[in-house]
Image (cartoon, rainbow, N blue to C red):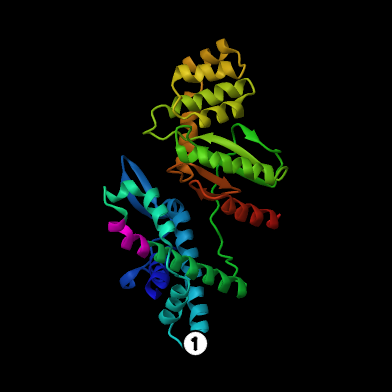
Amino acid sequence: MKTALFSVAAAALALSACTKASLPAPNGQPATASDSVVATYDGKQVTMTELDAFLAKDLYEMRRQGLETMVLRQLVEKEAKKAGKGEEEFLRAIAEKATPATSDEALQKMFEDHKEAFGGRSFDEVKPFLQARAGQEQSQAAVMAYLNELKAKANLKIVLPEPRIKVAAEGPSKGPADAPVTIVEFSDFQCPFCSRAAKTADQVLANYAGKVRLVFRDFPLPFHDKAPKASEAGLCANDQGKFWEMHDEMFGAQDKLGIDDLKAVAKKLGLDSAKFDECLDSNKYAAQVKKNIEDGKEAGISGTPAFIINGRLISGAQPYEEFQRVIDEELAKK
């Protein structure tokens, strides 16, 4: 347990220790200056500053994780000494206390939920594995709950400065233009995770009405063949004031994003079909979609969905609570 909890800290700190030009390089060599060229290709150059900017978010996450783990180690050491135990023994006791035998009914449900993964083996054959897995999950949950209690009790506050991503908030939007929090969403209409995240975004807008503005920017991924045209369809619908209706329809039926399907949806929404069809067939917004992709890549976006909240990145279909945490922090600063 000690290894699982604390090895992350050592690795994170080691990886993030020498990232700034002011820090010494290994073997006594001088650190690389921020404006030094570190690579060349196709007649272009990459400087240390550009590399640091590219890695900024990953470095921040590693530092934050390392910082939190370092503090937790000290807190656990303190509590373990009070109990007269070593850290590993102390945490193992917490884990074992929270792992009662799992009922056969619960194990049977686990088996049914993951039946395909067992390759035709029977419940009795995999029951020992299921019991071990259930116990492991309960142990991890118990330790994490205890660590969260320790953080709350110690009033832990991470004040590590987070890098801010600069990206234009341009595109179809919801919420007041002067909202204290602006979320720029990069999304792909053929991406199932984006469809899930769209529901979370709706929840955010409902709960923070008047305080949050959401701006949508297209980022169709290269392996989603229908996504580029779907992105254009959204912008064509936006010409007639129906972007969000088109947005919802496309995310609600991701298996129907062919050109004929998109035109049928436009007709269903009451759009001027002739204008919409002409817009879609003429590739009117192909260049705009391409620009969105380029701007996203420049901001460090590599997958979807991605949400930039006042310059702070949330990557993937994260739970509502993660959005809530960042938004509340931003509102508190205002």
* The N terminus, quarter of image: bottom left
Image position of 265 with respect to 329: above or below = above
Q: Nearer the viewer, residue 200 or 282?
A: 200
Left or right of residue 207: residue 126? left
Where residue 203 sits, quadrant-wise, is top right
Residue farthest to the top, as pictured: 274
Image position of 120 with respect to 229: above or below = below
The residue depicted at 57 percent of the width and 40 percent of the height is 199
Q: Amino acid at mark 1?
A: Lys
Image position of 130 with respect to 229: above or below = below
Q: Nearer the viewer, residue 146 or 77?
A: 146
Left or right of residue 309: residue 64? left
Q: Main secondary structure of the magenta part?
A: helix
Residue farthest to the bottom, as pictured: 84
Residue 253 is covered by the magenta coloring:
no
Which residue was labeled with disc 1? 81
The residue depicted at 50 percent of the width and 74 percent of the height is 72
Residue 214 visible in rendering: yes
Residue 89: x and y in percent read 41, 81
The residue depicted at 48 percent of the width and 26 percent of the height is 230
Secondary structure beneath dot 1 equals helix
Left or right of residue 188: residue 173? right
Specify start and end residues of the magenta stretch as a single range.
Answer: 124-132
Residue 131 is covered by the magenta coloring:
yes
Q: Nearer the viewer, residue 16 or 189?
A: 189
Q: Nearer the viewer, residue 250 or 70?
A: 250
Residue 132: x and y in percent read 35, 65
Left or right of residue 212: residue 21? left
* The C terminus, quarter of image: bottom right
Residue 282 visible in rendering: no
